[in-house]
Amino acid sequence: MGLSTAAVFSLLFLVGVAATVSLIKAQEDYTVILNMGNEKLLDRSFRDVHSDIEIIDVASVGGNLVITVNNTGNTVFEIDNVYLMINGSWIPEDAYSVSILQSPSNGYWEPEETIEITYSTALSGVVVKVVAETGVEDRYLYGL
């Protein structure tokens, strides 16, 4: 009875050590994954805090509404993800075009670069809002 009790105790002790080691390893994996997620969240928050755009000018040119916008922040935006609202209504993407003024278009709107949005309808007395991909926006009262 003494030998079998010692054998059972030893076996249970080894199972307990193995379970503890696997729990510690699982906790370590969970901590690494959690830290990676926190780093991504911090990077996104930093980018959003340092993002800003400014509508410099709105003008009617040749039957079009031309909106000039400067990227005054530190974030690079894709020009395909720049959206236009007029008087609170989203404008369909096929009704306007976006082009970068300083350089040949590589599809990215770099900090301190200026874009020009050409809307195919000339308007006056409107509220123009430009929204970039991360929700960064600026509003301009034109002709009001």
Image (cartoon, rainbow, N blue to C red):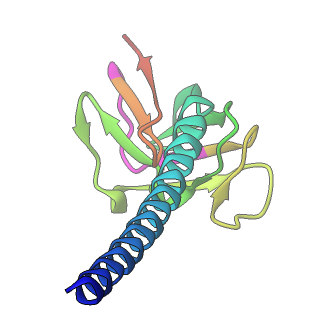
Residue 45's x, y, as percent?
A: 52, 37
Front residue of 126 and 62: 126
> Which residue is pictured at 53% across the width and 44% down the height?
44
Front residue of 4 and 12: 4
Residue 116's x, y, as percent?
A: 60, 45
Look at the image and give the residue range highlighted in magenta: 116-126
Residue that protrudes farthest toward the right in the picture: 103
Up the image or down, 94 lies above or below 112; here it is below
Residue 135's x, y, as percent?
A: 41, 39
Judged left or right of residue 83, residue 49 is right
> Which residue is pictured at 33% across the width and 18% down the height?
125
> Which residue is pictured at 65% across the width and 59% down the height?
108
Residue that protrudes farthest toward the top in the picture: 144
Up the image or down, 41 lies above or below 27; here it is above
Front residue of 15 and 6: 6
Residue 129 lies in quadrant = top left
Judged left or right of residue 43, residue 33 is left
Up the image or down, 57 lies above or below 7; here it is above
The C terminus is located in which quarter? top left
